[in-house]
Every structure is written in structure tokens, then in C-alpha cells.
Image (cartoon, grey):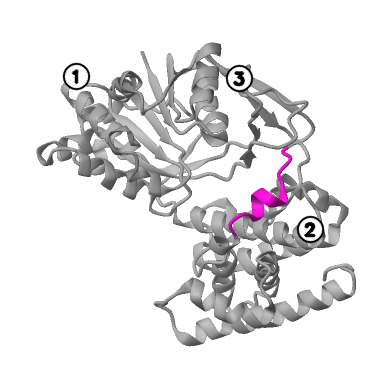
Amino acid sequence: MTTFVGFGFGPIQAGLFLAEAFSSGNFTRLVVAEIVPEVVRAVRRAGAFTVNIGHADRISALTVGPVEIYAPGVPVDREQLVQAVAAASEIATALPSVMHYVTGGDSGVHAILAEGFLHKLACDGPPAVVYAAENHTRAAELLAEAVFAEAPANQRDPMRRRVQFLDTIIGKMSGAPEETADLQPVAAGLKQAFLVEAFNRIYISQIQRPSHGVELDPAWADYRRGIEVFVEQPDLTPFAEAKLYCHNAGHALAAYLAHRLGLRRIDELRQRPDVLEFVRSAMLEESGAPLLARFGRVDPIFTPAGMRAYANDLVERMVNPCVRDTVARVGRDPARKLGWEDRLVGAMRLALHAGVAPRRYALGVAAALHWLELEPVRANAYLCDLWGPLDAPQDEQDTVLACVAQACEVLQDWERRNYPNLV
């Protein structure tokens, strides 16, 4: 019996990991942990769940089952999760953030994984990979640290030889939309529906093999992933930067400009081709050119033609009405998105280091500050306080702030002129 186990039952777990595990036909058992009681009850009654998939021209529904769902805070359910982890060959965490790796005490994901891996060693269970899908550059490392800290010291090395933690680059757009009348609910009795785009090209860390000179369990020599569609990469750094500073930065820029225009859904930007071209140009000139300079030709994406295709595809996917992405979802938590190393300011810095003026992303920062209802005169103080002490030259910070100040003036002028074509 080949087992997949997921922790956290949101759109990414349901619409990516469990859906792909089910569609692969390579697993005989699907297990998921969820803490919301009514969701556990509904999915358990149904023995399955449904996820809606947004294609370019339609929305389809996929029912995934049979699936077992357990509440980690319930002792008998927790034991089922521990035993499932011991038997699993692939595991995925899709939690709200990496902070949840060490919360929950004995019912936390770190504690259950540690106990499950100890059982795996005791019963000679299969080697397993753990996909960490929490959108953090050190997610796999942090999860591994949390799990190993729960294990006895003399069991940590055997555990490391049997289990590998993998980072992920997930460019799949997903959510639980407000408009659900024509969507299939997660399960009968629930109002909530999951809607994810059909895109499934997901990059993951390369799985290590004994032949790589790493001390591993010999069983890794014959290990094959059940979720075959994922793409292993020996170095995820180029793809992580493209995701954060091109995909995420462009998406955030689109959301904050859409907010200024009073739009509710991202696909409404199809009414403003000038804004979409502005976003596309930001991706190509302020993200793409610096990324090509840094990672040229490590992958077809990092070529002029590849980056152009990547940006065009992203813009087309962002405004897909069958995904129903909202401005509120994409633009939420602007303070985090304005972090020194996060999407907008991080993309500005990437451009500046390459000698490119980041005027478009600076306008995105100005629009994000407007979302926060901050007056332009307060922008510098707010950003400096948000960034805190920086291990960066003062002139770099000053340059970023100067670009933002200029963009705030441009944004005000754009508003005064009732949002004419953005050039």
C-alpha cells in the first residue's frame, strides 16, 4: 500500500498535492490532517472531497477519494496520523506559515511527523519525502529542524537517512472564492468551495540518492515519486527569485493598481490593457532583465525568449476569469509585501543592482502605501520602521526611498487625472 499524507486542508493541499496524488494513480491511500471540526465531519461523511479547477475557458470539478481525514487534536485521530506517516512515501505540509511548524504541542505537525518517523524506523517503513509548501525560502530546513528537535538525539541521524525535506516553488493560483453558486462545495454540507487553476508545473528540491555521496538508506536507490508531475531542480534559487521577484511582484503590482481603480477581481483588469502592459513591462524589464543577468541560461526560462514567454503566460493566467482571483486576496497583508526582501521592494532592489530604474515597481509600492491609507509624507518613516535595522548600504535604502517618493507623486497625478492610460 502506497500512502500519501497531507497536513493542512486548504486549496493548495486539496487542489495540488492531494489532487495530483489522486490523479497519478500511484497511491492506494490518501490521508490528510485538518483542524476545522465541520470540515473533518463533512469530508469524513463523504469519504472524498471536490475541488474546482479553472482552465482557460471553463471550470471543471474533480472529486478526490477515497480520502481519510483526521483531526490531530483528537487522540485517536492523532494516532491514525502517526501510523500513516510511518507508512507514507510522500508527505506535504501546506500550512498558513512556517510559524505553524512548532505550534500545537503534541498535536502539532512537528510532533506528529517526529513520532511517525520514529515508527517508520522501528517498522522499517519506506523512505519518504516531505514537501514543505509554506512559501518561505527556508521552509524545508525549518521544518526539518522542528521535527528533528522532537526526536531523541540517537535517532536523528537514522531519521535523516530515511526522510528528506524538500522545498517547493508553487506558482499555482488558488483560493476559496466568495462566488460559489456555480461551484461544487468541498463536500456536502459545506458552503466552502476550493478553486484552483489547472497549472501544475511545480519545482521542487532534487531528491538525493546514495550515488550522490550522501549517507542515505539504501532504499533511496530505487525510490520513485508517486507525484510525477513535479520538476526536481538541483538549485531552486533561480526559480525562487523568479517566483518572488517576477511572478509575485507582478501579481502584487497588478492588485494594488486594480485597487486604485476600484476593481474587485483581478480579471477585471482585462478592461485596462494599458495596466496589463505596464505590469508585463515591469516583469520583463525590471524583473526579467536582472534575472537573466544573474541566472542566464541555467534553464530555458532564463533566456530572453523564455522570460518573455514566462511573463506573457503569467499575465494571461492572472486575468483568467475562470480562476476568479480577487484584488483583496492578492493584495492582502501589504506590510509583508513591502518587506525589504519581499516582492515589491525586493524587485526594486534586484533592478537597481542591475542598473535598471524600477519605476513601475516603485509605483506598486506607492499604491500599496495608499492601500494602507498612508499619506505620502509618512511613507519614508513607515517603510524605515517596517524594515528595521538593515544589513545593507545606507545609499541603497536612500535610493529605494527616493524612487518611492517620486512614485507617490506619479500616483497622485494619475488619480488627479482620473486614471488615464498608464504609460
Image point (60%, 66%), residue name: 344
Residue 255 at x, y percent in the picture: 71, 56
Given residues 411 and 218, the one toward you in this image is 411
Q: Earlier in the sequence, mark 3 or mark 2?
A: 3
Q: Which amino acid lies under the numbered mark 3 shown in the image of this protein? A: Ala
Image point (70%, 69%), residue name: 370
Q: Residue 123 has which mark?
A: 1
Label 3 and label 1: CA atoms lie apart by 35 Å
Label 3 and label 2: CA atoms lie apart by 36 Å
Residue 101 at x, y percent in the picture: 35, 44
**First to last magenta residue range:** 323-333
Tag 2 residue: 276
Determine whether the residue tagged by mark 2 lies in a helix, strand or loop. Answer: helix
Q: Are marks 3 and 2 in contact (CB under 8 Å)?
A: no
Label 2 and label 1: CA atoms lie apart by 56 Å
Q: Are marks 2 and 1 in contact (CB under 8 Å)?
A: no
Q: Which amino acid lies under the numbered mark 2 shown in the image of this protein? A: Leu
Q: Earlier in the sequence, mark 2 or mark 1?
A: 1
Q: Is residue 388 visible?
A: yes
Indicate the quadrant where residue 28 lies.
Answer: top left
Determine whether the residue tagged by mark 1 lies in a helix, strand or loop. Answer: loop
Determine whether the residue tagged by mark 3 lies in a helix, strand or loop. Answer: loop
Of tags 3 and 2, the one toward the viewer is 3
Tag 3 residue: 187
**Residue 331 lies in the magenta-colored region:** yes
Q: Earlier in the sequence, mark 3 or mark 1?
A: 1
Question: Dot 3: few (<14), some (14–19), or many (≥20) neighbours within 10 Å?
Answer: many
**Residue 136 lies in the magenta-colored region:** no
Question: Dot 2: few (<14), some (14–19), or many (≥20) neighbours within 10 Å?
Answer: many
Image point (38%, 28%), residue name: 90
